[in-house]
Amino acid sequence: MPSALRANITFPTRYRFGWGRRSELVAEARAAGIHRALVVTDRGVAAQPWFPALAATLADELGAEVVDGVSTNPTEPEVLEGVAA
């Protein structure tokens, strides 16, 4: 899918999306001074076929932890679980 749309959006956070952009994530995190990451998501995203590879890369490169039991509107216990991770 190299012909897929690629874009940078800055409003106020910079978003990157498009084919192959996931491979830029670790370099972008390091450029932003991030040395450890907490990935907070819901079970639906965590169940996507691409997510395990992404989570493994972030764990290997940035010591990332994944909290994947978050609801659409997170509750206080869910937030505390993320903090504990």
Image (cartoon, helix red, strand yellow):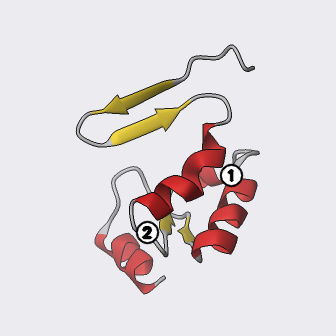
Horizontal side of 75 relative to 82 (left or right) equals left
Residue under the image location 68 percent in, 52 percent down: 51
Residue under the image location 58 percent in, 72 percent down: 62
- In the rendered view, tell whether residue 14 sits above or below residue 28: above
Q: Identity of the amino acid at label 1?
A: Phe
The residue carrying mark 1 is: 51
Quadrant in which residue 80 is drawn: bottom left
- Where's residue 43, x and y in %? 59, 55
- Where's residue 12, x and y in %? 23, 39
Residue under the image location 39 percent in, 71 percent down: 78
Please name which of the two marks, 2 or 1, marks the residue nearer to the observer. Answer: 2
Residue under the image location 53 percent in, 69 percent down: 67
Q: In this rendered view, identify the residue nearer to me: 57 or 31.
A: 31
Real-space CA distance between mark 2 and mark 1, rounded to the nearest whole angstrom: 20 Å
Evaluate whether residue 36 shows in this view. yes
Looking at the image, the residue that sits furthest to the top is 3
- In the rendered view, tell whether residue 45 sits above or below residue 78: above
Instruction: Say what secondary structure mark 2 lies in.
Output: loop
- Where's residue 58, x and y in %? 62, 65
Instruction: Say what secondary structure mark 1 lies in.
Output: helix
Q: Around disc 2, counting alpha carbons within 10 Å, would you say few (fewer than 14), some (14 to 19), or many (20 or more)?
A: few
- Where's residue 6, x and y in %? 55, 23
Residue 34: mark: 2
Horizontal side of 50 relative to 83 (left or right) equals right
| Numbered marks: total | 2
Horizontal side of 59 relative to 70 (left or right) equals right
Residue 14: mark: none
Horizontal side of 31 relative to 65 (left or right) equals left
Sequence-wise, the earlier of marks 2 and 1 is 2
